C-alpha cells in the first residue's frame, strides 16, 4: 500500500522544456523569471529543490510544489532598494543547495535585475572574484541580465569589503543611511534593524571611544557613529569645521523623523537637533559635504564629552 502511495505522488518529466524560463549559471544554480518558478515541469526537469524569490511578494502557496523549499527576499526593482544586507542570507540558502548538489532557482519577475544581483553576489563570494568578472560569467549563461545602477553600486561596495558585510566600513554605514533614508518616516526602523544585522556579522566590530552626556554621563554615541569622510588623501589639507554630525541612534527612538531637538533620555538635557524643519542643518565644509545623507543628527557643542 505504502509503495503504491509513493509511486502515485512521483511525477516524471521526460522531455526538456522547449523554451526554458531559467538558465543554468553555475553548478546547480539557476537564474530565471517568475514563470519558471511556477512551472512544475521545469522544476522537476532541472531538479529544483530550492527556490529563492526576490520580489515584492512571495510565491503563493497554491503554486508550491512538493519537496521544494521556498524562500523570499522582499525587494523591489529600484535603485534605492537595499539588497546588500540580504547577500549573506541568500548565500547560505544557495550554498546549502549547491553543496547538496540539488537545483536552486533564484528568480524575480524577469530574471534581469534583482535575481541577477543575488546570483552575482553569491558567485563573487563563492569564487572570490570581482564584480566585472562574475558579471561576464553570468552574462555568458544568460545574456539579458542587467542589475540596476543602485545594485551595481552595492555589488562594488560588497567587493570593496572583501565579499562580506563590514560594519566598520564608513562607506557601508553611509550607504545604509542613504539608501534607507530616502523616505525617512517608513524606513528608520528598518535602518536600525539592518545595521544591527551587519554589526552582528562583523566579528571585529570596533565602536571606538564613547561620548557621553555632560549632564549625566549617559552614553550618547560612539566614534563609529560620527559621520565623516573616509580619510583618503584628498581630505588631508581640507579645512574641517568643528561640528559633529552622527547617525541616528536607536535610543532616539523615533518611528517618525519629526522631532527637531534631541534630549538625553536620562537627564533631559538638549544634546542635538535633527529633522526636516532644520533645512540649514547641513554643513558646507568639504568634510561634511561628502557625507551625503538625508538624515544627519547634529550634536550640540559642550553637551557631550569623550570618555
Ligand atoms: Zn544626560
Ligand atoms: Zn562641516
Image (tube, grey):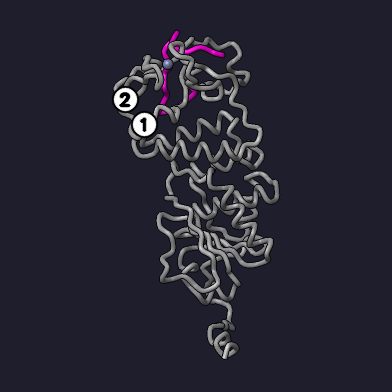
Q: What residue is at 41 percent from the left and 22 percent from the top?
A: 297
Give residue 254's mark: 1
**Looking at the image, which residue is at 31% across and 25% down?**
259
| Neighbour tally class for label 2: few under 14, some 14-19, many 20 plus, Cα within 10 Å | few
Residue behind label 1 places its C-beta within 8 angstroms of ligand 1 = no
| Depth order, front residue of 238/72 | 72
Q: Earlier in the sequence, mark 2 or mark 1?
A: 1
Of residue 152 and residue 217, the one placed in the foreground of this image is 217
Tell me if 37 is positioned left or right of 135 in this view. left
Whether residue 289 is visible, yes or no, is no
SS state under label 1: loop
Query: Relative to 22, is 114 above or below?
Result: above
Q: Badge 1, how many Cα within 10 Å: few under 14, some, many 20+? A: some
Within the image, what quadrant is residue 81 found in?
top left
Q: Is residue 128 left or right of residue 18?
A: right
For the residues labelled 2 and 1, the Cα–Cα distance comes to: 8 Å
Residue 259's disc number: 2
- In the rendered image, the vertical position of residue 292 relative to residue 116, given as above or below: above
Q: Within the image, what quadrant is residue 293 found in?
A: top left
**Residues rendered magenta in the picture:** 289-307
Judged by its main secondary structure, the magenta piece is loop
Q: Position of residue 105 (x, y in %)?
A: 56, 63
Q: Position of residue 237 (x, y in %)?
A: 59, 11
Does the beta carbon at disc 2 come under 8 Å from ligand 1?
no
Question: Is residue 160 placed above or below 16 in the rendered structure?
Answer: above
2 and 1 marks in contact (CB < 8 Å)? yes
Residue 209 placement: quadrant? top right
Amino acid at each position: 500500500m505504502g509503495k503504491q502511495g509513493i509511486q502515485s505522488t512521483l511525477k516524471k518529466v521526460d522531455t526538456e522544456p522547449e523554451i526554458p524560463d531559467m538558465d543554468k549559471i553555475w553548478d546547480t544554480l539557476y537564474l530565471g523569471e517568475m514563470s519558471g518558478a511556477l512551472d512544475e515541469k521545469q522544476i522537476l526537469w532541472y531538479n529544483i529543490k530550492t527556490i529563492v524569490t526576490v520580489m515584492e511578494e512571495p510565491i503563493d502557496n497554491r503554486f508550491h510544489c512538493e519537496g521544494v523549499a521556498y524562500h523570499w527576499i522582499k525587494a523591489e526593482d529600484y535603485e534605492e532598494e537595499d539588497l546588500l544586507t540580504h547577500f549573506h542570507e541568500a548565500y547560505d540558502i544557495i550554498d546549502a543547495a549547491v553543496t547538496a548538489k540539488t537545483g536552486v532557482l533564484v528568480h524575480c519577475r524577469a530574471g534581469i535585475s534583482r535575481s541577477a544581483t543575488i546570483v552575482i553576489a553569491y558567485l563573487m563570494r563563492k569564487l572570490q572574484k570581482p564584480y566585472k568578472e562574475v558579471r561576464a560569467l553570468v552574462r555568458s549563461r544568460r545574456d539579458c541580465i542587467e542589475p540596476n545602477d543602485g545594485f551595481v553600486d552595492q555589488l562594488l561596495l560588497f567587493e570593496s569589503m572583501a565579499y562580506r558585510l563590514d560594519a566598520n566600513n564608513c562607506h557601508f554605514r553611509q550607504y545604509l543611511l542613504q539608501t534607507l533614508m530616502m523616505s525617512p518616516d517608513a524606513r528608520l526602523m528598518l535602518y536600525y534593524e539592518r545595521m544591527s544585522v551587519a554589526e552582528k556579522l562583523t566579528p571585529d566590530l570596533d565602536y571606538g571611544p564613547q561620548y557621553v552626556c555632560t549632564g549625566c554621563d549617559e552614553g550618547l554615541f560612539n566614534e563609529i557613529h560620527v559621520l565623516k569622510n573616509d580619510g583618503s588623501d584628498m581630505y588631508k589639507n581640507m579645512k574641517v569645521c568643528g561640528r559633529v554630525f552622527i547617525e541616528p541612534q536607536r535610543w532616539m527612538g523615533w518611528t517618525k523623523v519629526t522631532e527637531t531637538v534631541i534630549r538625553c533620555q536620562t537627564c533631559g538635557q538638549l544634546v542635538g537637533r535633527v529633522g526636516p524643519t532644520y533645512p540649514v542643518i547641513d554643513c558646507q565644509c568639504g568634510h561634511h559635504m561628502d557625507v551625503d545623507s538625508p538624515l544627519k543628527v547634529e550634536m550640540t557643542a559642550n553637551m557631550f564629552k569623550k570618555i
